[in-house]
Image (cartoon, coloured by chain):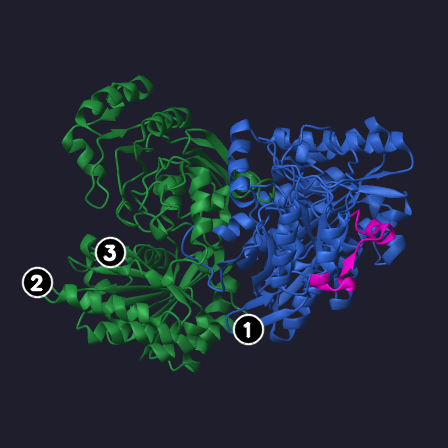
Chain colours: A blue, B green
Amino acid sequence: MNAALTSELHALLGKRNVLSSPEDLALYEYDGSVDRARPEIVVFPSTTGEVSRIVKLAVKHDVPIVGRGAGTGLSGGALARGGGIMIAFGRMNQILELDLENRRAVVQPGVVNFDLTRAVEHAGLYFAPDPSSQKSCTIGGNVSENSGGPHTLAYGVTTNHVTGLELVLPDGEIKRIGGKIADSLGYDLCGLLVGSEGTLALVTEITAKLSKKPEAVKTLLAIFETVDDATETVTDLTARAITPAACEMLDGWTLCAVEDYVHAGFPRDCGAVLLIEVEGVAEAVASQAVGIEEVCKAHNAREVRTAKDDKQRELLWKGRKTAFGALGRLAPSNYVLDAVIPRSKLPQALRRVLEIGKECGLNIGNIFHAGDGNLHPLVLFDPRNREQFEKAVKASTDIVRYCVEIGGALTGEHGVGMEKSELMTLMFSEADFALMRRVHNQFNPTGLLNPGKVFPMGKGCGETRVRTSPMHSPVPA
Amino acid sequence: MSSALTSSIASRFENIVGSAFVQTEADAVADYGVEGLLPSAAVFPENAEQAAEIVKIAAREKFAVIPCGGRTSLSIGLAPSRYDVALDMTRLQGIAHYDPGDLTISVDAGMRLAELARILAEKNQFLPLVVPFFENATIGGAIASGLDSPLRHFYGTARDFLIGAEFVDGTGALAKSGGRVVKNVTGYDFHKLLAGSLGSLAVITRLNFRTYPVQPSRRGFLASFADEIHALAFMRELAASPLTPTLVEAISPEFAKLFLEEKSPVASLLLDVQAWTVCVGFEGSSEVCERYARDLGRLARMASTQDAISVHDSQFLSLLEILRGAPVSMSRAASRSVVLRLATLPGRLADLLRALRSFASSSWIPSAALIRSGSIVYFALLPREGDETATKQIAYFCKSVDSLHGQLEFNSSALFCPREWKSGFDSKAQVPESLDLQRRVKKAFDPNGTFASGRFAGGI
């Protein structure tokens, strides 16, 4: 990193808001994915004005920029693939306004997802997107990646809960799009920006919708002898127009690890469980729960348990939300995949995932959002073993490729990032990329903002790529 | 397009679609007028590839193209600066995929909404896009025109259930975004930009939706209130309750009178021309519906309702039909009616409504209002036949609405409006701050300005 830029950043932000020593930077070279890329400098702005000035400095020195929230992302979206400046939004963590009457919150990007819910739950409201990392991930990161969660099934992903944004464009200009009113005039720019993975602009303020907490919630745990019985139950629930708020599957093998960790009373001898939640007015919850139990029993469920109180319910969800961590007990590392399939193809897709695991000689766990067909195969491997790492990457590519082949999509909630940029060609044509590039270049013409994401670079997939010298890579034409 | 050019270009279009599917005669193109401008040719592609070829020629020859479906909403938007070719998409009629078990459908742009609804109904499913011109509008046109549905209260707008699109961009390339699965964050969400874009970015050729199961029972509740204060109080209590209705619409007394004049079966049930009527829809099992009816009755009494009634399934569907066409009923209520669509926040609704009604009454123009989902106001100005002062009064009204910006959070657009008054409603006071970003999007999709410019918000 050139000394002039570093000293200009020191002058702008103060030394304590600028990290540049190798041991500090090492903490910012990873996120929740398997990729690594080290920034050359990490800065912590407190205001939109500072973000704008940082961006202008980056432009002056021709250095790439990447935004980062909590670094919990699973696709490498917040990694500095082009080196350069990482703008960490951790200190822009203020809830600026709670407009309870109109059910809107205006927040800075570094506000932790669950902190917003905590701030409004006294009024019977909450922020609906609920990624498993919601106690640490930031809303800015959610906006970038268009994050989902278990309750996406009923309430949609982040984009369905954002009505306005403040942006800093890659030339430092500050812009507002949308606002508190959901129907803005003109094109739906929020719809474009949410999920654009930090490749079009940096988000410095978010106006989010707040949702009303349901009157009643019922959480069911259905236990099956086989994975097939569980997946067929999900397909049947959808076909019978039963619409739970969440419908999660955990296979029996991963469930043992989870139970060792959370002691929620999950069975240790089953093929799979479904964790199903219904919400709404009490009468609707009661009748839906009856319908769900019938369908589970029709597919040979050994047992259908209902959480008796909030404590039991929270324990079941703790099992689900900490499952990936629990699996850390089984192998030194794991690779969480994210792909979507049409829900009717769930049984065949799960069978194929298990086959691919056998072919690669790796254990693959399955803990996922079954209700919307969002798979999260979890490939266990030892990163110190190069051969295993390569097998894990191959297994993941095979799985994602298969999901796309049967009518699915590359990512349901984690984003493309650098993890899947090479796989984008599975879904998109040259003409699609040409349009995406034109849109990208209208916002980010120099390519300084988050280079190397979303668009294929023409290199192999999943390989760890670290750049050490400042270089920017405009999206290849 | 000059007439000399017309014949040579028309023959190139004919090479693509066949001579039967290019029309240049005056009476044929007369049906494709947009704000007084007529195209030189109307072309009817059979598929997306043909549509792309036509756009390619237009881009090369610098013709201005407007894509059309059922031509029911072409008057929405401002006058285009040029208009050479109407691209009629109604021959694209197929269902590319429909797996009812997945609750998703992929449908060609030219299919009529009513036909799509029929196909979904066979599987006991529906699309919550219950919009004006339901019988004749195409699905592509309904998305491009951005009209909203009473069911948005529960099901949201197109951006919430449109999961993917295929389209022809301004260079004539076939492109797509999203996919056919209900959860998908792969790539930029271009389909969200297409919703409400009035064909200014691309020609929609195919749309993918998530569909919804029809619930066992769909019912309604109507309550009348002495004034809007009480009606709005009821709506506030309802919003704070645990209930999640499918629709909440409030009808002004003047609008109730229009409905009565249409002699609809539901209108004769209760609508009181002296009172504000709030219509609430709900659905689910019979126990759920009974709970709604009970709670709504209690909430309405608390808000001093004058009269309340529950309506059962078939009556509810008639009510939904009436509400779906409400903006059109407004536009037909006078020969020079203006229908404004204003979006605001629930907490600003009372102030906005009061201001609009007071401007209308001090302009001596009869008016009518419909409040949708606690945040949208359809406001009709209905000048009397032969009222020579109307133009002046409308100008006064426009100026008054403009003066509200800065005091109240809202935005407004003229949905249906006589051509000569339209520009007055294209307020300078509310050009979006992001206009230059809007222009960048237009430039990326349509670098040569092939899709007729001038119609979209901000003159894009």
> Farthest residue in the front direction?
A4
Position in image of residue A201 (x %, y %): 58, 50
Q: Chain of mark 1?
A: A
Position in image of residue A346 (x %, y %): 67, 37
Q: Which residue is mark 1?
A: A100
Above or below for A92 versus A355: below
Q: What's the magenta region?
A: A11-30
Q: B227 and A397: which one is in front?
A: A397
Q: A300 and A384: which one is in front?
A: A384
Q: How many marks?
A: 3
Q: Chain of mark 3?
A: B
Report the Cα–Cα distance between label 1 and label 2. 47 Å
Q: Which residue is mark 3?
A: B422
Q: In this rendering, which labeled residue sits more in front, label 3 or label 1?
A: 3
Q: Tell me if residue B329 can be seen.
A: no
Indicate the secondary structure of the residue bearing disc 1: loop
